[in-house]
Image (spheres, grey):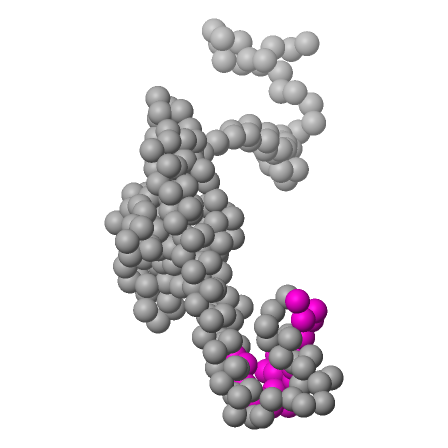
Amino acid sequence: KIGFLKSLMRARYAVEPLGHYGLAKKKYTHFTSPIRRYADLVVHRALFDKNSAPTSVLKEIAEHISVTERTSADAERDSKDVKLFAFLKAQLKADAPIKYPALVTDVRNFGFFVDVPGLAMSGLVPLSLMEDDFYVFDEARRNLVGRRTRRQIRLGDKATVQVAKVDSFKKQVDFRLATEERNPNAPRPSARPFVPRSRSFKPEPKRSQPSHWKNSRPKDSHSKKSPPQDAHHGVAKKP
């Protein structure tokens, strides 16, 4: 949306019916109270005055009003930039810079651009200020990929940024990704933490002896016990 609005031409005053692109009107004009702007006064005179100015005069007035409105808009923007850059330079000197939510609007091989609604401005996050990883630009997918963390930065991603550099002469502001607040004495987590595997040992169930194994010893063909023999004579004793 922001890129589309920036690509549109600035509005200007003209005698011819140029229409309105957003409203899809072939003939369009607008006016409010005549004490607010000179353009409104000219429209009131053309509507209600019997002796209106000729077309050549109205054409000169339209061109003059278009130029003066652009000049006043540029002066208003420059005055806001002066105060804004002074405010941002004060943040660089502060111990705790302010964090701003941002939206990635463009990705390049040297960094990515973000739009910061809280400051009503855009800026660059250069790759040289990204210390968490080394990022590689993927030209086909138009994104940045970290070599170690495999983090991806794509168009439309949300991020939290802080002011890193202010150039009031070039009217440029560089941002950096906001660092997470953590204990400096805490150990730094590794990329792939070691997680020991838990092994559970279950006792093996007792194996039951098959039924056909029981009483597998061959039985004696005689049902009665044989009489004991004498150890000395080797003959059987009589009962």
> Which residue shows up at 60% across the image and 10% down it?
237
Q: Where in the figure is residue 122, as x and y percent of width and height?
A: 42, 56
Q: Is residue 164 magenta?
A: no
Residue 62 image position (x, y, % from top left): 53, 82
Q: Residue at x 39, y 37 (%)?
A: 91
Residue shown at 55%/28% (left/top)?
203
Q: Quadrant of residue 97?
A: top left
Front-most of 134 and 33? 33
- For residue 156, above or below residue 99: below
Residue that sits furthest to the right in the current view: 48
| Residue 50 appears in the figure | yes
The answer to whether 66 appears left or right of 177 in the picture is right
Viewer-closest of 204 and 42 = 42
Q: Which residues are magenta?
A: 12-35
Q: Is residue 49 above or below residue 235?
A: below
Task: Report the residue that reaches farthest toward the top.
Answer: 232
User: Is residue 19 shown in magenta?
Assistant: yes
Question: Where residue 41 appears, x then y in whole percent?
Answer: 64, 75
Say if residue 193 shows up in the picture: no
145 or 216, which is in the foreground?
Answer: 145
Q: Quadrant of the C terminus?
A: top right
| Res 98 → quadrant | top left
Identified at 33% across, 55% down, the residue is: 171
Foreground: 76 or 55? 55
Residue 187 to residue 108: above or below: above
